[in-house]
Image (cartoon, helix red, strand yellow):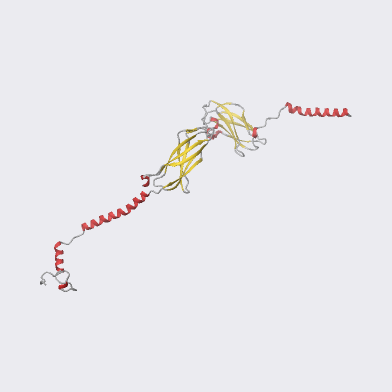
């Protein structure tokens, strides 16, 4: 009985060994990292205006893909690709595809790639290196974008003067302390300054700054801010870099009272001067009576006493020819 159990156990072990032998002889296919889709070309080098076959696997089933030949490793986006000669393909049920793609001259020099991107579904994409014989080759442009600028301190400096009191454009200096929290230096960062009043949208102007902010360092940046002539009220000055507003500073601009005083004086002095000039002209051109007429009129008035006074009580005194009292 014990021998029968031993024979049965040996048979079971032999059966398990025979089952595992195929798995040991043929390893399992590699698993895609994180389920990332893959693409490949049948030739790593192809002449310009030739053709290449692109294959892929691991894509979503039934996904629509675009295949583009691009220069400069597609650093500049699709602007570096031969978009007019691109091709589209739909993946099969197993997520694979195969497509012949023409190889025109891309608008940018090599290094070149075949860019495969999903149009529907998720935004999966991959690039396959490709050498295009006869197409120029140039060094890749220096990549930026690793810098991350942050403002540690900000203030507005300056004050208005006499000319500003009479309506000259208000001017201030925005002084900010900028720190680079990224991994690459920020060379000649292109800042944008915006000025807004109330609920109105800011008016942006480009203010590039000459200098470099090294990673982990900070720099003092000074930028000039100027408003329109006669501006007054509560304004907001905004500093933007890389599409992100770094800081906002309020600015209370005083009313140009000199302009108000000027127009007030102008409204009073000018009419008064015109009136005086007009009266001088009238006084100059009006007719005047002769002096003899005035004397005769005075003498006639003195010929008799006033009707309500007696000759003795006439306040004008005795008239000519009156007997002495």
Q: Which residue shows up at 75% across the image and 27% down it?
A: 22
| Image quadrant where one finds the C terminus | bottom left
Percent coordinates x, y for residue 215 in the rendering: 52, 33
Q: Give the left or right position of residue 75, taking residue 228 as reference.
A: right
Indicate the position of residue 10 as horizontal and vertical percent values: 83, 27
Q: Is residue 241 visible to us here?
A: no
Q: Position of residue 289 (x, y in %)?
A: 17, 62
Above or below, 166 relative to 208: below
Q: Is residue 255 left or right of residue 296?
A: right
In-front residue for pair 165/126: 165
In the image, 230 versus 89, the foreground residue is 230
Q: Image height check: is 309 above or below 189?
A: below
Q: Quadrant of the N terminus?
A: top right
Question: Is residue 278 toward the left or the right of residue 136 in the image?
Answer: left
Q: Determine which quarter of the picture holds residue 70.
A: top right
Place of residue 142 in the rendered image (x, y in percent of width and height, measured from the top left): 51, 30
Hey, which quadrant is residue 159 in on the image?
top left
Is residue 159 shown left or right of residue 55? left
Is residue 153 in sight in this rendering? yes
Front position in the image: 217 or 15: 217
Residue at 46% in and 37% down: 221
Figure disc tally: 0
Give the residue at x 49% y 37%: 178
Furthest toward the right, the residue is 1
Residue at (55% x, 29% y) in the render: 112
Q: Quadrant of residue 173?
A: top left
Judge whether 161 appears above or below 82 on screen.
below
| The residue positioned farthest toward the front in the image shown | 325
């Amino acid at each position: 009985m014990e021998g029968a159990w031993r024979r049965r156990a040996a048979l079971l072990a032999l059966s398990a060994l025979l089952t595992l032998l195929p798995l040991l002889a043929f390893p399992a296919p590699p698993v895609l990292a994180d389920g990332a889709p893959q693409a490949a070309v049948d030739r790593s080098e192809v002449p310009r205006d030739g053709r290449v076959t692109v294959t892929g696997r691991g894509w979503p089933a039934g996904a629509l893909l675009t295949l583009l030949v691009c220069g400069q490793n597609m650093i500049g986006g699709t602007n570096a690709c031969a978009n007019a000669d691109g091709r589209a393909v739909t993946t099969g049920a197993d997520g694979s595809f195969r497509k012949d793609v023409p190889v025109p001259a891309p608008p940018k020099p090599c290094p070149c790639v075949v860019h495969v991107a999903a149009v529907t579904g998720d935004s999966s994409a991959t690039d396959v290196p490709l050498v295009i014989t006869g197409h120029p080759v140039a060094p890749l442009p220096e990549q930026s974008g690793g810098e991350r600028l942050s403002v540690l301190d900000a203030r507005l400096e300056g004050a208005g003067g006499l000319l500003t009191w009479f309506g000259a454009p208000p001017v201030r200096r925005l002084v900010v302390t900028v720190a680079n929290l990224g991994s690459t230096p920020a060379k000649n960062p292109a800042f944008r300054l915006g000025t807004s009043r109330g609920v109105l949208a800011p008016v942006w102007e480009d203010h590039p700054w000459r200098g470099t902010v090294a990673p982990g360092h900070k720099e003092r940046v000074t930028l000039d801010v100027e408003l329109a002539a006669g501006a007054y009220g509560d304004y907001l000055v905004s500093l933007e870099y890389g599409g992100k507003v770094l800081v906002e500073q309020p600015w209370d601009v005083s009313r140009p009272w000199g302009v108000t005083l000027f127009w007030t004086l102008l409204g009073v002095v000018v009419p008064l001067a015109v009136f005086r000039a007009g009266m001088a002209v009238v006084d100059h051109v009006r007719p005047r009576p002769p002096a003899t007429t005035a004397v005769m009129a005075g003498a006639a008035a003195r010929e008799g006493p006033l009707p309500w006074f007696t000759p003795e009580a006439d306040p004008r005194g005795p008239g000519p020819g009156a007997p002495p009292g």
